[in-house]
Amino acid sequence: MEITVENNKNQLKVTIIGAVDNENAEELKSQFQQFLKNDFEEAIFDLSFVPFITSSGIGKFLIFYKNIISLGRKMRVKGINDNLFDLFKSIKLDKLFPIEK
């Protein structure tokens, strides 16, 4: 898994490349903790290159979401494939933050 980050115009743009399995979820967790130290209004996650996410990975996204909402910030997911889109909708993540294909 690779993570690239751009922080500009109050947007933190995060591109994740590769599967988010249980091992990578721990790396994601530490990255998310670093992201919280940045100054931004909205975190945008590009998941165009993520073939799948384990439940542990989804859990890390939920924890990050909870943390940024408590800081008055927003989160959005874009570039999600059909399988992940269906999964995110089935567990109602689309009710928490916008999800775009």
Image: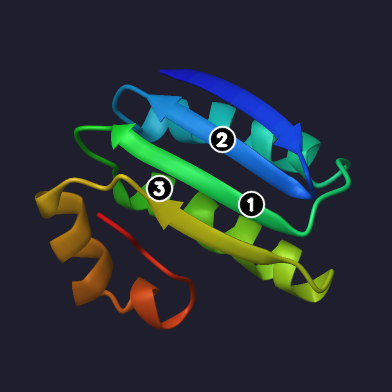
Q: CA distance from mark 2 to mark 1?
A: 7 Å
Q: Circle 3 is placed at which residue position?
A: 56
Q: Secondary structure at mark 1?
A: strand
Q: CA distance from mark 2 to mark 3?
A: 19 Å
Q: Secondary structure at mark 3?
A: helix
Q: Are marks 2 and 3 in contact (CB under 8 Å)?
A: no
Q: Secondary structure at mark 2?
A: strand
- Examine the image and state in which quarter residue 72 appears: bottom right
Q: Is residue 66 above or below residue 26?
A: below
Label at residue 14: 2
Q: Position of residue 9 (x, y in %)?
A: 78, 45
Observer-nearest of 74 and 28 = 74
Label at residue 43: 1
Q: Amino acid at mark 1?
A: Ala
Q: Are marks 2 and 1 in contact (CB under 8 Å)?
A: yes
Q: Is residue 49 left or right of residue 40?
A: left
Quadrant where the N terminus is found in the figure: top left
Q: Position of residue 41 (x, y in %)?
A: 77, 59
Q: Is residue 1 left or right of residue 71?
A: left
Q: Is residue 51 left or right of residue 19?
A: left
Q: Amino acid at mark 2?
A: Val
Q: Earlier in the sequence, mark 2 or mark 1?
A: 2
Quadrant where the C terminus is found in the figure: bottom left
